[in-house]
Image (tube, rainbow, N blue to C red):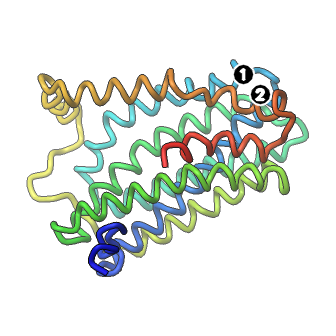
Amino acid sequence: MPARRRLLSDVTPLRESPQYRLLYAGELLAFLGSQLTVVAVPLQVYLQTRSSLAVGLVGLAQLGPLLACSLVGGVVVDAVDRRVLLVWVQLARGALSLGLVANALRPEPALWPLYVLTAAGAGLQAVDAPARTAAIPAMVRRELLPAAAALHQILMQVGVVAGPAVAGLLVARAGLAAAYAIDVATFLLASLLALALRPLPPGAGAAHAGVASVMEGFRFLRGRRALQGTFLIDLNAMVFGMPRALFPALGTELFGGGPGTVGLLYAAPGAGAL
């Protein structure tokens, strides 16, 4: 039994902490919901334009808000109540997905909302992730932090496989608007779970949100070549090593499939990593 336990992930944080269970369930819902748009938006862009370049521009549109909000997201998380921040971020992400629903239901859906709404969603996700990570130490014992980090990785890896695969099947059977509507529902449920958390105020001595705090982060990064290298390698892999812009064309044209095939292509990199 002890040997078998060493082979399995430690679920003690989920067993011991009701607050962590709420946070974990909310993250699961929000992440799976976001995976629906990972498939549905590029597929819709390709079906409307038949252009992989147009699909690739979706990712380019997300890059600016993602970088900008990543820079200020950590500062904001350190300065405000993380519970309140999580509630409002989920509601905002749900509102963006509601905009995708409205656009998909139009007789002739416009192209620009797919770029604008997903770009804004990428910025919100860059705030959501550090807020959840920063909340964990207040919910579990210090010695359980590695176990909580492992559980987070399990959620992410399973989500990037199951989410796109389910998204492709959902779009194939119920349509794009239905996929976006389910995305709205997941964010609403995630906001309710965040609302059930106890207050998570910033710690004693927390810095105020501002440019000075952002510059302090850059000063911390300066001279730490291991961290700089990690960031550059990850950025290089995400920008140049992931042919996601080609998946709608590959799934529908080369392989002669439909949304289900496209969903499996988006799930494939996660399956390989897992």
Residue 176 circle label: none
**Residue, far left:** 205
Q: Which residue corresponds to the image point at 27% horizontal and 55% vertical from the top-left?
A: 134
Sequence-first disc among 1 and 2? 1
Q: Find numbered disc 1 in the image and state the secondary structure of the residue it sits on.
A: helix
Q: How would you rate the neighbour count of disc 1 (Cα within 10 Å): few for under 14, some for 14-19, many for 20 or more? A: some
Front position in the image: 83 or 66:
66
Which quadrant of the figure has residue 19? bottom left
Q: Which residue corresponds to the image point at 74% horizontal and 32% vertical from the top-left?
A: 248
Tag 2 residue: 249
Q: Amino acid at mark 1?
A: Ser
Front position in the image: 176 or 77:
176
Front position in the image: 211 or 182:
182
Residue 252: percent from the left, percent from the top? 83, 33
Residue 168: percent from the left, percent from the top? 74, 49
Q: Find numbered disc 2 in the image and state the secondary structure of the residue it sits on.
A: helix
Q: Nearer the viewer, mark 1 or mark 2?
A: 2
Q: Which residue corresponds to the image point at 35% horizontal and 57% vertical from the top-left?
A: 132
**Residue, far top:** 53
Residue 52 circle label: 1
Q: Does 71 sit above or below residue 16? A: above
Q: Amino acid at mark 2?
A: Ala
Q: CA distance from mark 1 to mark 2?
A: 7 Å
